[in-house]
């Protein structure tokens, strides 16, 4: 099979991913072999290939928003062969640590992350744990379903972590793949949506999608916000969001990595029971709840498609915020059938 492989992290402009031929893996006990049909490109992939997140294994096939077809089941796995499933960032947990037993598997002490601890979906085939795949909304084709699997699920978790209630005023800071999937959820909940983002193009996109207000990254809406979610990997943005909150408001940080956290004034920004919370990973329940809601409100990602061999380019586009919505790798059908 063909796979885009990372050997050594480096800036994406230097082409860290190399297209290679590899044997098709066999699914071990409890796993399934998928023929990958599409794989979303996430900012976390960028942090992995550029080395902001320390490598967990090398070589590595990244990619954790996999839409695939079940080709073969390993011993003990009983997914229907030929069925279409989705795979996300949380590729496995131990099921036994204090967090797992408390229903907080997103905080598991021994998690397995897809495309980080195990090979992911930037390839024609992938092996995944059978108990960590998700049913996908039938109405969505592969490329529109793929970004729901991390950008969508974790954006949804961020709204939960921020404690969003129907009708509230919610700020979205940054308007990439995840935010553009959170916006229609907020609309469905009757919220007023305030989008702060750099780049006229992203502001216009947010406006077209129904934002109540749009502004620059450090601009403050005239009304105080109940909640905010920051998507940009920048600490300055977290402080800006904090400054826009009412008393008792919450900022949820939807970023696995921040450049730095600047000093800020406690008295004016955090006093008054304002809170900053981080959003770590996801649970399978988040995935089930979000994918059901996505089907109900007919949520569909805005996507730009790249073939597998252009994975470096897709990552560069994410890095430079050059796209509206999400980048998705699609896997060539003819090559797939040959396997
Ligand atoms: Zn655990
Ligand atoms: Zn992701």
Image (spheres, grey):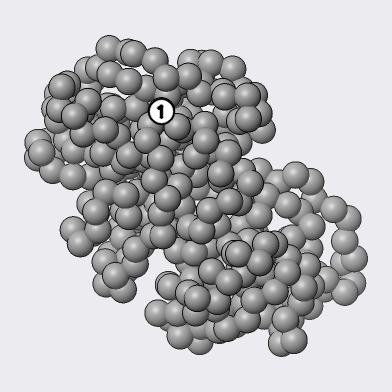
Q: Is residue 269 left or right of residue 320?
A: right
Q: Residue at x 73, y 65 (%)?
A: 217
Q: Residue at x 63, y 61 (%)?
A: 174
Q: Residue at x 31, y 60 (%)?
A: 291
Q: How many marks?
A: 1
Q: Is residue 191 left or right of residue 307?
A: right
Is residue 316 or residue 195 the one in the foreground? 316
Q: Position of residue 197 (x, y in %)?
A: 67, 65
Q: Is residue 139 left or right of residue 259?
A: left
Q: Position of residue 33 (x, y in %)?
A: 21, 28
Q: Quadrant of the N terminus?
A: top left
Residue 259 falls in image quadrant: top right
Q: Is residue 11 left or right of residue 243?
A: left
Q: Position of residue 189 (x, y in %)?
A: 43, 81
Is residue 126 or residue 128 the one in the foreground? 126
Judge whether 281 appears above or below 270 on screen: above
Q: Assign a secondary structure to mark 1.
A: helix
Residue 289 falls in image quadrant: bottom left
């Amino acid at each position: 099979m063909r796979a885009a492989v990372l050997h050594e992290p480096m800036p994406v402009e230097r082409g860290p991913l190399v297209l290679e031929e590899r044997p098709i893996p066999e699914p071990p006990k409890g796993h399934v072999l998928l023929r990958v049909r599409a794989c979303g490109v996430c900012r976390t992939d960028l942090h992995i290939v550029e080395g902001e997140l320390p490598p967990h294994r090398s070589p590595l096939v990244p990619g954790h928003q996999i839409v695939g077809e079940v080709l073969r089941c390993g011993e003990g796995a009983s997914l229907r062969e030929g069925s279409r499933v989705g795979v996300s960032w949380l590729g496995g947990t131990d099921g036994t640590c204090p967090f797992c037993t408390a229903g907080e598997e997103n905080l598991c002490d021994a998690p397995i992350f897809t495309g980080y601890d195990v090979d992911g979906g930037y390839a024609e085939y992938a092996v995944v744990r059978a108990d960590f795949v998700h049913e996908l909304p039938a109405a969505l084709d592969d490329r529109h379903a793929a970004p729901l699997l991390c950008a969508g699920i974790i954006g949804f978790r961020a709204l939960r972590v921020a404690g969003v209630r129907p009708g509230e005023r919610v700020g979205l800071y940054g308007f990439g793949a995840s935010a553009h999937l959170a916006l229609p959820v907020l609309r469905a909940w009757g919220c007023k949506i305030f989008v702060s983002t750099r780049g006229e193009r992203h502001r216009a996109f947010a406006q077209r999608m129904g934002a109540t207000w749009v502004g620059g990254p450090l601009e403050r809406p005239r009304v105080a916000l109940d909640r905010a979610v920051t998507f940009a990997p920048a600490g300055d943005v977290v402080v800006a969001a904090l400054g826009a909150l009412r008393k008792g408001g919450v900022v949820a940080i939807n970023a696995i990595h921040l450049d730095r956290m600047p000093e800020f004034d406690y008295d004016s920004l955090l006093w008054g029971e304002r809170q900053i919370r981080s959003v770590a990973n996801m649970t399978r329940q988040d995935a089930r709840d979000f994918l059901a809601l996505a089907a109900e409100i007919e949520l569909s990602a805005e996507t730009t498609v790249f073939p597998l061999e252009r994975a470096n380019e897709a990552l560069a586009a994410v890095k430079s915020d050059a796209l509206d919505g999400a980048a998705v790798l699609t896997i060539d059908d003819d090559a797939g059938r040959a396997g």
